[in-house]
Amino acid sequence: MANRANDNLRASHTGARHRGAASRVGRDPATQPQSEVALDLMGREKTFGARNYDPLPVVLARGEGSWVADVDGHYYLDLMSAYSAVSFGHAHPRIVAALIAQAQQLGVTSRAYYNDELPPLLERLAQLTGLDRALPANGGAEAVETAIKAARKWGYKVKGIPDGRAEIIGCAGNFHGRTITVVGLSSEPQYRDGFGPFLPGLSTVPYGDADALLKAITPRTAAFLVEPIQGEGGIIVPPPHYLARCRQICRDHHVLMICDEIQTGLGRTGRFLASEYDGIEPDGVILGKALGGGLLPVSAFVATNDVMQVFHPGDHGSTFGGNPLASAVAMASLDVLFEEKLIERSAELGAWLLSELQDLRSHVVRDVRGRGLFIGIEVDPRYTTARPVVDRLLARGILSKDTHGTVVRIAPPLNIPRDDLAWAVGEIYAVFRELERDVKRAA
Ligand SMILES: Cc1ncc(COP(=O)(O)O)c(C=O)c1O
């Protein structure tokens, strides 16, 4: 049943795209109002759900590869990939097959017992990151919490920080998730407002400024937590050698360097880990999102023996972390990443996309930046915000997302067909030309 629906999806969206204006790619709100079905679903979500999100007005019902369809059969090219959770495309047949096979075999065991799927995954994560041991979790923030717990305990047991005084340094503009600990490290007022008191011992330094890190380190500093490229912060690529300098500073001061690669990892930036661009070996790496193959939440904290040895039975855990179903899906996802050469593809297609978008040369655009298929288009706030760009792209059949008011994030599945991406570039150009015209008219 599901396969038949997906076959239709693939045939339909390509056919529709080639038919042009009369197609069902996208939905122009001026001429195509929301259907009753869509309005009903959005209304019920607004009525019965907590209002902690403000989704774009599209109700998705199916997905295959880089394309999704809404409840009314309008197609959209997904340039967002669920914040990189869908890096291998929707319903990748191999990952879906692994999910189904494992679900029929053994789903969840808890860690009260060994299971036959987790050990190969742990070994593979250690080998791929060049680290020693992995601790599996589910969502990303949970793995960040795990890393912070490990860093604090390492600070007391290994570094000798007086009990209760350990400090963790993060970066301004960071995004590491939404738990109480993690928002305590955030510099974004909205993420913190109303949620205090926060944990003590958390501070931030400006991102991209290694000297600021050096100044902030004290004898009580246990760890420096950093995103190799800030995603939610606006696809901020730090200056060259920033991570390498931070690595050296951390080593000199016996401070752990932990890279949050939840979004940048698994090929997103054209390397397995984005920190590879600086040639560094961190003490710990946090993975998530794409590790779940677009099907399940799977995350992990991977670290050196020195760090991970602080955990003893009973110190930390999670009922679902490392379950056989999640482990099988993560293994299949890693197989897809390497066997389909998606890291190389991200580097190559990303470089092409970046140069195409940098050629936009629009006065409405302030900057186009990124690495691999992780790109941000920053608009000039004197003329527009990012949201109208995202809305216009949606109308034309492209899913993207605004962040920090002025940045449109573009992060398609790593296996997106080149001609789909080329079509999207044409649409992005058209949207910016429209905006330029509107700005001129308003002036
Ligand atoms: C760098 C980074 N860390 C952590 C998280 C939190 O992950 P999750 O939403 O799965 O808790 C995110 C999510 O966007 C992220 O981008």
Image (tube, rainbow, N blue to C red):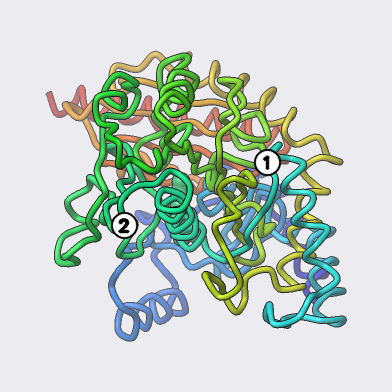
Counting from the top left corner in percent of width and height, residue 8 is at 77, 63
Q: Amino acid at mark 2?
A: Asp
Please, which residue is most extreme toward the left here? 443
Q: Nearer the viewer, residue 5 or 83?
A: 83
Query: Residue 151: x, y in percent?
Result: 45, 50
Residues at marks 2 and 1 touching, judged by CB atoms closer than 8 Å? no
Between the C-alphas of marks 2 and 1, the distance is 27 Å
User: Which element type, helix, strand or loop, lies under badge 1?
Assistant: loop
Residue 369 appearing in the image? no
Picture coordinates of residue 148 (x, y %)?
A: 42, 54
Identify which residue, 225 or 239, lies in the foreground: 225
Q: Is residue 229 visible?
A: yes
Q: Secondary structure at mark 2?
A: loop
In the image, what residue type sits under mark 1?
Leu
Point out the tag, 2 or 1, that comes first from the N-terminus. Answer: 1
Q: Residue at x 69, y 22 (%)?
A: 348
Q: Residue at x 79, y 52 (%)?
A: 123
Q: Quadrant of the N terminus?
A: bottom right
The mark total stands at 2
Which of the pair 183/270 is nearer the observer? 183
The crowd level at tag 1 (other Cα within 10 Å; few <14, some 14-19, many 20+) is some
Q: Which residue is mark 1?
A: 131
The residue drawn where x is 33% and y is 86% is 48
Q: Which residue is mark 2?
A: 163
